[in-house]
Structure formats: C-alpha cells, structure tokens
Amino acid sequence: MSRSPSGVRHDPASHAATPSSQAAPWFVPRMTTVSGASAGVATRRQAAAATIHRDRPYVPREAVEAVKATAFAKFDETVDIAVRLAVDPRHADQIVRGTVVLPHGVGKTVRVLALAQGEKAKEAEAAGADLVGPEYIQKIKDGWLDCDVIVATPDMMGVVGRLGRVLGPRGLMPNPKLGTVTQDVATAIKSTPSASPIKRPKCKLKRAKRSSQSLDGGVC
C-alpha cells in the first residue's frame, strides 16, 4: 500500500493484469480511505466498504446498484468509472480521448456557451445554448468564465485559440476530439448535458466522469 500526496491509499495489486478467463467486462466497486477523515465519516465509510465483496466481480448493473446502496454522504455523490484497456500508452496511435453520451445524463445542469456567428449562431440558439455569440471572446479575455462547456465553429478557432492559457487549465478549451469544435453545433449542444469526457491516464485505465447517484436510470 502506498499513499499519494492527496492522502488516498493506492493498492498496487489493484493494477495487476486481468486474467484471460475474466476478459469480459466486469466491475469491482472500490472504497478508498482518506487520511484525516472524521471519526463519523470513517465509520460510515467502513460500514459501506464492508458490503462490497472484493473477492468476486460485479456485472455493470449490479455494480451500479452496489454503488448507490453504499452512498452515505449527505450531498448528492458522484462516481468515477475506470475501464481497463488493452492499449500501450507509450504509442501515440493508441491515445484514447473523447466523450461518451450517457443515456440518462450526468445529473447536473450544464451552462453552454456557443462561439459562433451568422447562421451557426442561430442554430446554436435554436438548439438551446445558454449563451451565444463572438462577443463573449472579449468577455473571457476580461476574466469572465461563467459557463461549463464551450462549443465553437472551426472558423472561430483562430481567435479562440489565443485563449488557450485561460481556457485550457479549466477544461473549457474547445477541442475537435471532444466534439466541441464542429460545424454541427446543434448536435454538439444537444448532447452536451449527457456527455462525459473520457481520457486514458498513464495506468492504462480509461476514466470517465461522472454519473450522479441520484439518477433513477443509473448509467447502464
């Protein structure tokens, strides 16, 4: 067991290769222990962890039900999904990044800004974008960032690209790989409330955030 700077315990054995006999998709819900947690929270976490059987795999729907059943926080918790991939992260042609549209959304309200003009701006408004227009570029330069997702048309990227230092660290920079730089702004805007970004970290797992536990439909 090792401890990361954030205080989360990591078990190296959890990253062991998956046996070929268990090649089919399966899930094992995991509970992590964070140092400095209050006694009450630690007790509830231990009680929740005790209900998870670590010696057997869970099918997706069963895993979702187990995660929802072990929720103990007073707020609406969220879930990270990690999927083991048969890729080598050292090769550029095996980079995995994009978005996945969840059938029941991500459980939160998303404020969408569409950087488009002319007919594309009208399409964005009709598709339900909360904010539309190139005038927001100057507002962003002035420090305005009151949005969750930015969708842009390709002709706007020459100007939007200059905002990379502001938008990039906040995950707001439009990216064609994520479907947020496109001529089909209507489709991008309509799918945004249900879209969750996915990326491949160095440990050969694909992570996706996030699905609200309160959704009756789950994520399956």
Image (cartoon, helix red, strand yellow):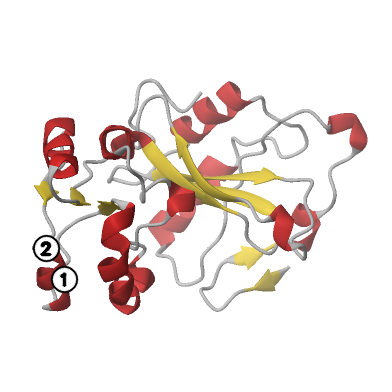
Name which residue type carries label 2. Tyr
SS class, disc 1: helix
- Which mark, by number, is residue 140? 1
- Which mark, by number, is residue 136? 2
Residue at horizontal 55 percent and vertical 79 percent from the top = 5
Q: Who is closer to the viewer here, 29 or 19? A: 19
Q: Is residue 9 left or right of residue 89?
A: left
Q: Who is closer to the viewer here, 170 or 135? A: 135
**Above or below — where is 37 with respect to 101?**
below
Q: Is residue 139 left or right of residue 212?
A: left
**Above or below — where is 166 with respect to 213?**
below
Task: Give the Cα distance between marks 1 and 2.
Answer: 6 Å
Residue at horizontal 77 percent and vertical 51 percent from the top = 87
Residue 46 spot, x, y in % from top left: 54, 49
Residue 80 spot, x, y in % from top left: 50, 47
Res 211 visible = no
Residue 192 occupies which quadrant of the picture?
top left
SS class, disc 2: helix
**Above or below — where is 66 with respect to 133?**
above
Q: Residues within 10 Å of mark 2 (few under 14, many from 20)?
A: some
For the image, the number of numbered tags is 2
Residue at horizontal 61 percent and vertical 26 percent from the top = 60
**Above or below — where is 76 with respect to 11?**
above
Q: Who is closer to the viewer here, 100 or 31? A: 100
Residue 62 spot, x, y in % from top left: 59, 23
Name which residue type carries label 1. Ile
